[in-house]
Amino acid sequence: LAKTTQPISMDSYEGQEVNITCSHNNIATNDYITWYQQFPSQGPRFIIQGYKTKVTNEVASLFIPADRKSSTLSLPRVSLSDTAVYYCLVGDTGRRALTFGSGTRLQVQP
Amino acid sequence: KAGVTQTPRYLIKTRGQQVTLSCSPISGHRSVSWYQQTPGQGLQFLFEYFSETQRNKGNFPGRFSGRQFSNSRSEMNVSTLELGDSALYLCASSLEPGTVYEQYFGPGTRLTVT
């Protein structure tokens, strides 16, 4: 299964756009890229998923280059409530990702 | 639609004891996965069940086991508890197994081993 690498932490201010990049050099042809958000003392919450190019939903965008060896989660105009840990997962339809990795701790300040 | 429920929410056990945690998935979801979360190791996958069969298993010792019932409810058991088993145990359900299917997580069971 593809291993993922993310920055340990990031800081931002309210109203700014935040981009979190995940590296997954060994991604396989059948793998999808999924991002989750986790607040303290809660289970992770699905944010967005993609296979290639760009995916956008009401909360975020996911950019995936042609080689798919990395992906970028984009959070537009963050607020204090976006302070959380963000996890990037890579896996296919047949196997569950074994680990969420260490994630990226995003701190949004006023 | 009700979310994933886990019982109990908090549990204190002594080393050497065993514990059983329960998870009720979202109605209609047939896949249930279990994760262990600790400050040091992060969120680690334990196992996944679908149609009462274990489909995937993470790198945990045999003391960790689970099962799934015909109504998709799942239990996990940890025998001969060790101090290092203290963690938040999360259950997640999805329509089908596999990473491509969005997982919905429960609030977790906080296990403390003394």
Image (tube, coloured by chain):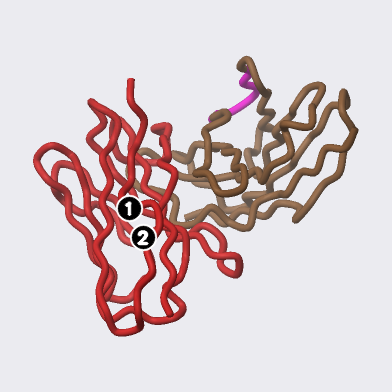
Q: Which residue is mark 1?
A: B8
Looking at the image, tell me whether mark 2 or mark 1 is earlier in sequence order.
1
Q: Residue at x 47, y 41 (%)?
A: A31
Q: Chain of mark 1?
A: B
User: Which amino acid type corresponds to the residue marked 1 in the rendered image?
Assistant: Pro
Which range of residues does the magenta coloring cover? Answer: A50-56
Q: Secondary structure at mark 1?
A: loop
Q: Position of residue A75 (x, y in %)?
A: 74, 27
Within-10-Å neighbours for mark 1: few <14, some 14–19, many 20+: some
Q: Which chain is red?
A: B
Q: Which chain is brown?
A: A
Residue B68 falls inside the magenta stretch? no
User: Which amino acid type corresponds to the residue marked 2 in the rendered image?
Assistant: Leu
Mark 2 vs mark 1, foreground winner is: 1
Tell which residue pokes out farthest to the left in this image.
Answer: B70
| Residue B79 in the figure: left or right of residue A29 | left
Q: CA distance from mark 2 to mark 1?
A: 18 Å
Q: Secondary structure at mark 2?
A: strand
| Residue B55 in the figure: left or right of residue A49 | left
Q: As displayed, is residue A74 above or below residue A24?
A: above
| Residue A68 in the figure: left or right of residue A97 | right
Same chain check for tags 2 and 1: yes
Q: As displayed, is residue B51 above or below residue B54?
A: above
Q: Position of residue A109 (x, y in %)?
A: 88, 37
Q: Residue at x 39, y 51 (%)?
A: B9
Q: Quadrant of residue A12?
A: top right
Q: Which residue is mark 2?
A: B46
